[in-house]
Image (spheres, helix red, strand yellow):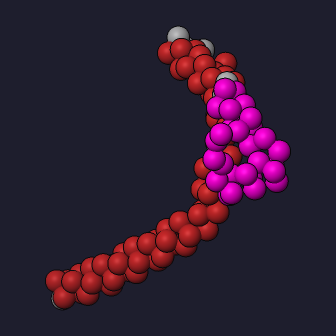
């Protein structure tokens, strides 16, 4: 006689056969991942042989397939994008301020040396 924990029994009763679902996911072949990898490899070969248009089109297709396979990663990156843009805007503002300060100091130096 086997002893089954209550939490596992509750999950099986609620979800049907959870072990069957896990084994089905574990045995499924990631065809999109394979297609994306092969497409990107083919695009590299096309670019090396000098067929730029076909290589770029194939690379675009491979990228789209990879994005379909990694939707969670793409979603996380898309959600983090506004934060990165704010950081870049702040960095550009500081760089602009530094350039303006250098320009003002250059003007002062020119006026001192010119007289």
Front residue of 104/22: it is: 22
Q: Find the magenta span and give its range.
A: 1-28
Q: Is residue 47 above or below residue 32?
A: above
Residue 29: x and y in percent read 67, 24
Would residue 58 be visible to someone looking at this image? no
Q: Residue furthest front?
A: 1
The residue sitting at 56% across, 70% down in the picture is: 83
Q: Is residue 32 above or below residue 9?
A: above
Front residue of 106/56: it is: 56
The residue sitting at 66% across, 48% down in the picture is: 4
The residue sitting at 19% across, 88% down in the picture is: 112
Q: Quadrant of residue 114?
A: bottom left
Residue 18: x and y in percent read 74, 43
On-image quarter of the N terminus: top right
23 in the magenta segment: yes
The residue sitting at 68% across, 52% down in the picture is: 8
Total numbered circles: 0
Residue 32: x and y in percent read 69, 28
In the shown orientation, is residue 76 left or right of residue 113? right
On-image quarter of the C terminus: bottom left
Front residue of 91/58: it is: 58
57 in the magenta segment: no
Q: Is residue 92 above or below residue 114?
A: above
Would residue 88 be visible to someone looking at this image? yes
């Amino acid at each position: 006689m086997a002893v089954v924990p209550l939490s596992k029994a509750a999950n099986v009763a609620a979800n049907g056969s959870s072990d069957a679902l896990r084994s089905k996911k574990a045995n499924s072949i990631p065809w999109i991942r394979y297609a994306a990898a092969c497409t990107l490899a083919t695009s590299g070969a096309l670019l090396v042989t000098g067929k730029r248009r076909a290589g770029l089109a194939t690379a675009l297709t491979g990228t789209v397939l990879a994005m379909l396979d990694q939707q969670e990663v793409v979603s996380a990156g898309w959600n983090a994008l506004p934060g990165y843009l704010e950081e870049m805007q702040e960095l550009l503002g500081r760089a602009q301020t530094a350039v303006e300060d250098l320009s003002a100091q250059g003007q002062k130096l020119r006026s001192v040396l010119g007289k």
